[in-house]
């Protein structure tokens, strides 16, 4: 099974990385977490990205705030799918990170989830891996069924009052 790389720009992004990791664990998907900055450790971020496919990764999640160039820097150095999670910071409520992550130049895509969207990034990574892994696909389907049943149960409780 391919693993997911979760790369954060700094340790302040750990709470979001942990949400992604927890969701991947629910699906039984192996992952590794790393702290590499696009600006402060560009050589290490590049080396990780260049070697990710040969190291058994299938998808990489890049988590960063403010200028948020990490996901783009990763995408520039691998052909693996990259999912960017823009992070909320004290300035601009994460809109700066969102725009930096989503506005990639033509030919260099980064899938982007919501600001602080660790769970959705992990689900998207799982969906990408599920293209070639029926076990993951079934786990995603089962979770969606459980989510729908939970909503319908709440609806029934609301309407039985």
Image (cartoon, grey):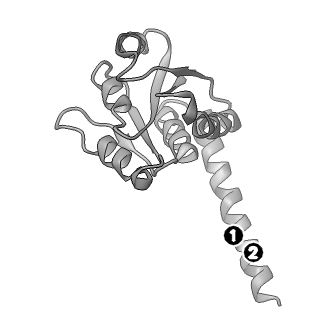
Percent coordinates x, y for residue 52 in the rendering: 43, 14
Tell me the SS state at disc 1: helix
Decide if residue 2 is in sight here: no
Which quarter of the rendered picture does the C terminus lie within?
bottom right
Is 125 drawn above or below residue 88 in the view shown? above
- Residues marked 2 and 1 touching at CB (< 8 Å): yes
Percent coordinates x, y for residue 66 in the rendering: 38, 41
Tell me the SS state at disc 2: helix
Which residue appears at 42% of the width and 13% of the height? 48
- Residue that sits furthest to the right in the current view: 161
Is 90 drawn above or below residue 77 in the view shown? below
Number of other residues with Cα within 10 Å of mark 1, as a class: few under 14, some 14 to 19, many 20 or more: few
Q: Give the CA separation, mark 2 to mark 1.
A: 5 Å
Q: Nearer the viewer, residue 17 or 106?
A: 17
Which residue appears at 45% of the width and 52% of the height? 114
Which quarter of the rendered picture does the N terminus lie within?
top right
Looking at the rendered structure, which numbered label has been put on residue 79? none
Q: Nearer the viewer, residue 132 or 88?
A: 88
Tag 1 residue: 151
Percent coordinates x, y for residue 64 in the rendering: 44, 35
């Amino acid at each position: 099974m391919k693993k997911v790389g979760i790369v954060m720009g700094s340790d302040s992004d750990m709470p979001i990385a942990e949400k992604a990791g927890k969701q991947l664990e629910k699906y039984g998907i192996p992952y590794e977490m790393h702290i590499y900055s696009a600006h402060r450790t560009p050589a290490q971020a590049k080396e990780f990205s260049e070697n990710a496919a040969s190291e058994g990764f299938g998808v990489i999640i890049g988590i960063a705030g403010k200028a948020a160039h990490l996901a783009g820097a990763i995408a520039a150095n691998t052909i693996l799918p990259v999912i960017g999670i823009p992070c909320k910071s004290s300035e601009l409520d994460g809109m700066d990170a969102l725009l930096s992550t989503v506005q990639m130049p033509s030919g260099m895509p980064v899938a982007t989830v919501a600001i602080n969207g660790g769970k959705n990034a992990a689900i998207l990574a799982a969906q990408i891996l599920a293209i070639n892994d029926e076990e993951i696909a079934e786990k995603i389907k089962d979770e969606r069924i459980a989510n729908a049943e939970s909503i319908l149960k709440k609806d029934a409780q609301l309407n039985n009052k």
